Structures are given as structure tokens and as C-alpha cells.
Amino acid sequence: MLKVQTALILAGGKGTRFSEYTDTIPKPMIEANGKPLLIHIMNIYISQGVKKFIVLTGYKSDFILNYFKNDSEFNFRNNLFESDQGIQIKILDTGIETQTGGRIKKALKHIEEEYFHLTYGDGVANVDIKELERFHFENETIATLTAVRPPARFGSLEIGENSLVNKFGEKNNSKEGWINGGFFILNKEIEKFIESDETPLEQQPLEQLAVNKQLKAFHHSGYWRPVDTIRELELLEKEMKEQLFNYYE
């Protein structure tokens, strides 16, 4: 059984880079192969034993709330959506202008456990949650993030004298370095590093944790796909059809 039982999903941003959709719906509700990104992300956790979720909404929060109200799989009681399979979902409106750190701070009083999962509502991966937990608790810090290789967007050129192309390379993400891919495990002590609603998690809190040697990176070399543009959505749908992305089994 997993030690960390609750997952927070950041789903309140305006998604301005995806305005073709987000003028009318929140970004995590954009569909990939017939299901919202939010549901795909939940299923990554559900397939590995996490069944309690807090969705941190803001922009067009009612759209997400109504989605679950209209889903016959869930019953709404005690401010929670619950399914017969034991899945619990709380939709927590954390404000339209609130930054990622502020959203987390507002959610902490709704979490019973000392630790919690956290990820973004616009990125999917076949992260092994059990391995992530094992790594986190091996040498416990306040925070662990999942480090991923960014998908290579362009082929590479090696250009020599007289503008001759010496080498033409296919897209290769192995040279792209490591970036924050979400899929965190956090201790509630993170609250001490979040000053206000205006605090982005990715700035002062994580920067200070790094200085304090309280931030670790779990390296994930498998599938990871951010969905910030229509092109990336198209790639995700293609990769899902090709079985490159499946819920972890």
C-alpha cells in the first residue's frame, strides 16, 4: 500500500498559451482522445493505488465542478465526489489570480496526512509512483520533484566552415538536460516557504528548498508529455494511439 494517499492537481491557471480552447474551458479539461487531460492525470495515480484527489481550481472552476456533477460514476455528498470504487475527489476553488504556491497553501488544511502528491493539470507521464515514493522516503526531504527530459522540438545541425552542414541530427531529447516535470511528493512543511497567494511554487519556495538541501529530483527517463499547445495535444493523441503513453501497470 502506498504511504502517500492524496494527490493535489493544479488546475486553476488561465492557460493563455492555449487560447483556442481556454477561452471557453479550463486547460485541464481539454480532451485528448475523448477524455479531459485531468482524467488522464487522475488515472495515472488511480492505476497505482492513489484514490484521494483535491483539484485546485480557479479559472472557470464551475466547468470542472459541473463535469463531475454530470458524471454518473460519482455521487456528491459531504462536499466530495465519491465513486463505488472508493475514489474521492474534492474540487477546491483557490481563486482565479492565485499562484501555484498559494493554491497549495489553501489546500493544506484539507489534507489529513503529513505528505501529499502534487502535479500539474497539463502534463502526463508513465511515472512509477511506487518508485517515486521509495526514492522520497529513502532519504527524506521536504520535497521531491520528478525530473524529466524535455521533448526535443527541433532537429539539430552541426555547421562547419563555409556554412556546410557537417551533421544533421534527428530530434533527440537526451541532449536537452533535465527539467521539472511535476509529479511531486511534498511534506506539509512546504507551507513555511509559501508567503502568500501570490507566491509561485516554482520560484522562492523551491529555490529556498534547494538552498536548504531539502529538494530532491527523482529522474524519470520514460514517457512525459506537456500539453501547452495544439501541436503538443496532437502529439499526445498520436502517442496514445501508438501505445507510447498508457496508464502505469
Image (cartoon, rainbow, N blue to C red):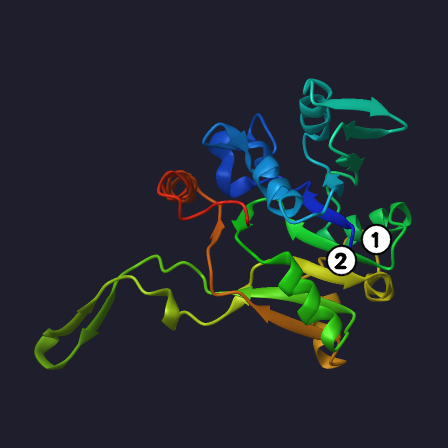
Q: Residues within 10 Å of mark 1 (few under 14, many from 20)?
A: many
Label 2: which residue?
199
Q: Residue at x 69, y 17 (%)?
A: 70
- Give the percent coordinates (x, y) of residue 69: 73, 20
- Give the percent coordinates (x, y) of residue 233: 43, 40
Q: Residue at x 74, y 67 (%)?
A: 143
From the viewer's perspective, tell me whether residue 41 is left or right of residue 58.
left
Q: Residue at x 72, y 80 (%)?
A: 211
Q: Say what amino acid the circle numbered 2 marks.
A: Thr
Q: Give the structural element (helix, strand or loop) at label 2.
A: loop
Observer-nearest residue: 214 or 51?
51
Q: Nearer the viewer, mark 2 or mark 1?
A: 1
Q: Earlier in the sequence, mark 2 or mark 1?
A: 1
Observer-nearest residue: 176 or 8?
8
From the viewer's perspective, tell me whether residue 181 is left or right of residue 96.
left
Q: Quadrant of residue 162?
A: bottom left
Q: Are marks 2 and 1 in contact (CB under 8 Å)?
A: yes
From the viewer's perspective, tell me whether residue 183 is left or right of residue 213.
left
- Give the percent coordinates (x, y) of residue 188: 85, 61
Q: Which mark is residue 105?
A: 1
